């Protein structure tokens, strides 16, 4: 006899840095009305240097533990590939698929895929980390066919925990300069920055798409799990599904 279990039928797996307090809470908020989607998290500790590439050795047992729930798709909820290189993230996805048995993405690759879907080739960059890293991000995007004529990064260097605590006014102020370069969209790189909550407001104010890395991660996960849908209230990308 075949029965259908109650609760979510779509399972998403997420690998989150241990210092990230935004990944779980924001994704649960975005999926509040999607009763058929469940999200399962596994955590790992980031290496000390922002320049270190994330690979299977860094993730340790986290992927294998996540594999136990048999997710339909999995994501590394981090953006280091935006400056260490997209190819490294593609290698990481292959490693994750080998371990977990599910299609995989990263926050960096999700943002890049969103730009292709929306046809954005000239974007402003909002990044809550050091300006030299933001410049590396711009260089990576440029090498991959996306022009980044303007970027905005804070003067003071913040820890990952501090980034999660900045307020809406701080995010809006940091975002402003990213719209000043005659761009057709803006990307917010940094999954612990709560910029997803500001996307709808920023898009309404400036009239162009805003791609937040945490939002893009969920968007790409849903597509990989073959369960895309329109989720409103978080900007154009999720609304278009």
Image (cartoon, rainbow, N blue to C red):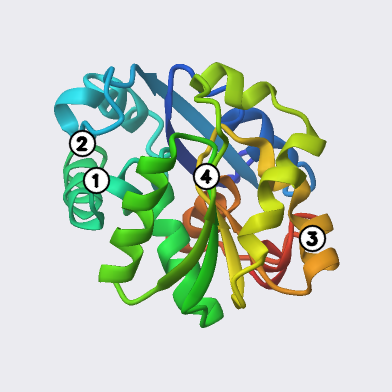
Give the mark, 2 or 4, whose residue is nearer the N terminus: 2
Q: Quadrant of residue 43?
A: top left
Can you tell which quarter of the image residue 54 is in? top left
Whole-number angstrom distance, CA of label 2 to CA of label 3: 34 Å
The spot of residue 234 in percent (x, y) is 75, 55
Could you tell me if the residues under marks 1 and 4 are in contact, i.e. CB atoms within 8 Å? no
The total number of labels drawn is: 4
- Residue 85 x/y as whole percent: 23, 52
Which is in the foreground here, disc 4 or disc 3? 4
Could you tell me residue 168's position as x and y percent?
80, 36
Name the residue rendered at 50%, 25% in the picture: 157
- Disc assigned to residue 84: 1
Residue hosting label 3: 232
Tag 4 and tag 3, C-beta contact below 8 Å: no
Q: Residues within 10 Å of mark 2 (few under 14, many from 20)?
A: some
- Give the vertical position of 17 relative to 200 (above or below): above
167 lies above or below 77: above
Which quadrant of the rendered structure holds the C terminus? Answer: bottom right
**CA distance separating discs 2 and 4:** 18 Å
Q: Which of pointers 2 and 3 lies earlier in the amino acid sequence?
A: 2
Q: Which residue is mark 2?
A: 53
Q: Are marks 1 and 3 in contact (CB under 8 Å)?
A: no
| Spatial separation of the CA atoms under disc 1 and disc 4 | 15 Å
Residue placed furthest toward the bottom: 119
Locate residue 127, reporting x and y percent. Answer: 52, 44
Disc 3 crowd rating (10 Å Cα; few below 14, some 14-19, many 20+) is: some
Badge 1: few (under 14), some or many (20 or more) residues near its Cα, within 10 Å?
Answer: some
Distance from the alpha carbon under mark 2 to that under mark 1? 6 Å
- Please name the residue that numbered disc 4 is placed on: 127
- Upstream in sequence: badge 1 or badge 3: 1
In whole angstroms, how far apart are the C-alphas of marks 1 and 3?
A: 32 Å
């Amino acid at each position: 006899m075949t029965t259908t279990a109650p609760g979510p039928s779509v399972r998403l797996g997420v690998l989150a840095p241990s210092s990230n307090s935004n990944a779980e809470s924001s994704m649960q908020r975005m999926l509040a009305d999607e009763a058929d989607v469940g999200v399962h998290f596994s955590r790992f500790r980031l290496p000390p240097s922002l320049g270190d590439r994330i690979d299977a050795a860094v993730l340790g047992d986290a992927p294998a533990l996540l594999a136990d729930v048999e997710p339909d798709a999995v994501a590394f909820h981090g953006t280091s590939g935006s400056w260490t290189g997209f190819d490294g993230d593609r290698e990481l996805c292959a490693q994750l698929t080998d371990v977990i048995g599910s299609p995989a993405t990263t926050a960096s690759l999700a943002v890049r895929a969103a730009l292709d879907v929306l046809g954005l080739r000239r974007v402003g960059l909002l990044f809550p980390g050091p300006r030299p890293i933001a410049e590396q991000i711009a260089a990576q995007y440029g090498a991959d066919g996306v022009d980044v004529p303007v970027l905005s990064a804070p003067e003071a260097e913040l820890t990952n925990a501090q980034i999660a605590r900045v307020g809406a006014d701080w995010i809006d102020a940091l975002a402003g300069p990213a719209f000043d370069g005659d761009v057709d969209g803006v990307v917010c790189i940094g999954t612990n920055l709560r910029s997803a909550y500001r996307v709808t407001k920023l898009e309404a104010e400036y009239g162009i798409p805003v791609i937040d890395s945490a939002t893009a991660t969920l968007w790409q996960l849903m597509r990989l799990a073959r369960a895309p849908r329109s989720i409103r209230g978080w900007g154009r990308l999720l609304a278009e599904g």
